[in-house]
Image (cartoon, helix red, strand yellow):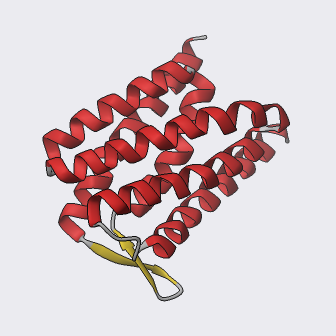
Amino acid sequence: MRARRLRAVGALVAYIATIPAANMAVTHFGVVPVGLGYLAPAGVYLVGIALVLRDLARETAGRWPVAAAVLVGAALSYWLASPALATASAAAFALSEGLDFMVYEPLRKRGLLTAMVVSNLVGMLADSLVFLTLAFGSLQFLPGQLLGKAWMTAAAVAVIAARRRLATI
């Protein structure tokens, strides 16, 4: 029980940290290459990790602590990043989280990795559309946003799958 609580707190803290960190990355590094000739705002990698951390936090802490974590991350973003960037980020995370609730929960019965991949695909599209529109007034970086988040989701899912395989050995 104690170990589960520690995992829940760790996942929530990591998830919360990615939200302002992503905004700070955009502020300080601007646009970065994500591969295949595409560019995206620098926070893309952290948001890709955030999508996975959100699901891991939901597994250990539950859905309402994760919803509260979005609010805490947004508040930290207002303190650490520009209000315009923080607003775009908060709106994107809120929509992404709402859609994740609708997609993740029913798919969870089919397995963690299935639910994670599908909900992250939905989340990364919604997050990217809202964030880019509000923060940049353009969808110019949409392919790069999707690619960067997909890289991070794929890497995280591979690590989780490998860890689960090792745990069964």
Numbered disc total: 0
Image position, residue 62 (x, y; %):
57, 21
Q: Residue at x 30, y 57 (%)?
A: 134
Res 4 quadrant in image: top right
Quarter of the image where the N terminus is located: top right
**Up/down of 30 relative to 125, above or below:** below
Residue that extends furthest to the bottom in the rendered view of this protein: 37
- Using the image as rendered, state which of residue 121 and residue 10 is in the foreground: 121
- Using the image as rendered, state which of residue 147 and residue 164 is in the foreground: 147
Res 166 quadrant in image: top right
**Up/down of 83 relative to 10, above or below:** below
Res 113 quadrant in image: top right
Residue that extends furthest to the top in the rendered view of this protein: 1
Q: Residue at x 32, y 54 (%)?
A: 22
**Up/down of 11 relative to 44, above or below:** above
Quarter of the image where the C terminus is located: top right
Q: Residue at x 58, y 39 (%)?
A: 99
**Up/down of 158 relative to 59, above or below:** below
In this rendering, would 65 be left or right of 71?
A: right
Image position, residue 158 (x, y; %):
69, 57
Q: Residue at x 34, y 68 (%)?
A: 41
Image position, residue 136 (x, y; %):
28, 66
Image position, residue 84 (x, y; %):
19, 52
